[in-house]
Amino acid sequence: MLDEIKKKQIYNVLLMPIQCTKHSGFNDERKVDIIKTVNGIKTTQTYWVEYKNKNTGTPFRYNFQPDCDMSDFACGFYEIIYKEFLDGKKVVDDNGCLVDNEFAGDTMTSVSRLPGLKNKYHCLANFWIIPMELGRKSIHELSKTSNRYCIKDFMDRFLLLLKFNLDDYKKIFPNYFSKIDIFSRMSDIHLINESYLDKQHNIMQYSDVINKDTEDYLWNCIKKRAEAISNSRFGPELWYYFAQNNILEN
């Protein structure tokens, strides 16, 4: 068990803004850097999608695009709190590719319509793992940015869509949803009870009206998830992970 001081240290790290700086390299040349700064955390990123030319089969990559929720620091976080969900596998292999496209890092709450959160929303407490097609891409009709259902990346709308279409999600993304047989499991796996869900696993809706109060409400949701994670059974391993990388505040 962790004492309250260590839990508070974890909580603080979970809310630190993250900046993804550069690519870390591949395989034997891979060099991961995670550095605490005055303003937050700077980290490298191994993730860099590789494609194949349809005509020749030659592998290629587009220009590198850093993304905090797929940074090396974030992936280490996922591999701790989602260890069982991932069956002990990594999120990204040493060649920069997802081990399984159904398990990709993503940002829970984005700020396209919430400018007040712009400088602080890129933090571990606001990151989770969902299928690539639902989070990192925006074309799937059941995604977090679905135009068909007007989700617009709001968590309450996405969770409602998921709750009432769970059977469809299970068919389309069987690897991910094989461990989410009922909606309430989302709370256990993602530690979102009392932030986006209440104690009875009801979805707490907030996006009918978007204003300054919405920003305050969502930042409070992010802080509540940070608290849930720091008090969870993953706390000791997280504390050690942060300590190893010299991220903890005294």
Image (tube, grey):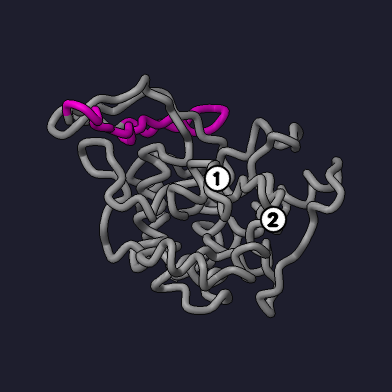
Cα distance, mark 2 to mark 1? 13 Å
230 in magenta: no
User: Crowding near pointer 1: few (<14 within 10 Å), some, many (20+)?
Assistant: many
Give amino acid for label 1: Thr
Whichever of callouts 2 and 1 sits on the residue coming sooner in the sequence is: 1
- Mark nearest the camera among 2 and 1 is 1
Do the residues bearing badges 2 and 1 touch, measured as CB atoms within 8 Å?
A: no
Q: Please state which of residues 164 and 181 is positioned toward the viewer in this rendering.
A: 164
Residue beneath the point at 52% across and 74% down: 185
* Residue wearing tag 1: 107
Residue range (magenta): 33-56
Question: Residue 83: x percent and y percent?
Answer: 34, 63
Q: Secondary structure at mark 1?
A: strand
* Residue wearing tag 2: 221
Give amino acid for label 2: Cys
Quick check: 138 left or right of 243? Answer: right
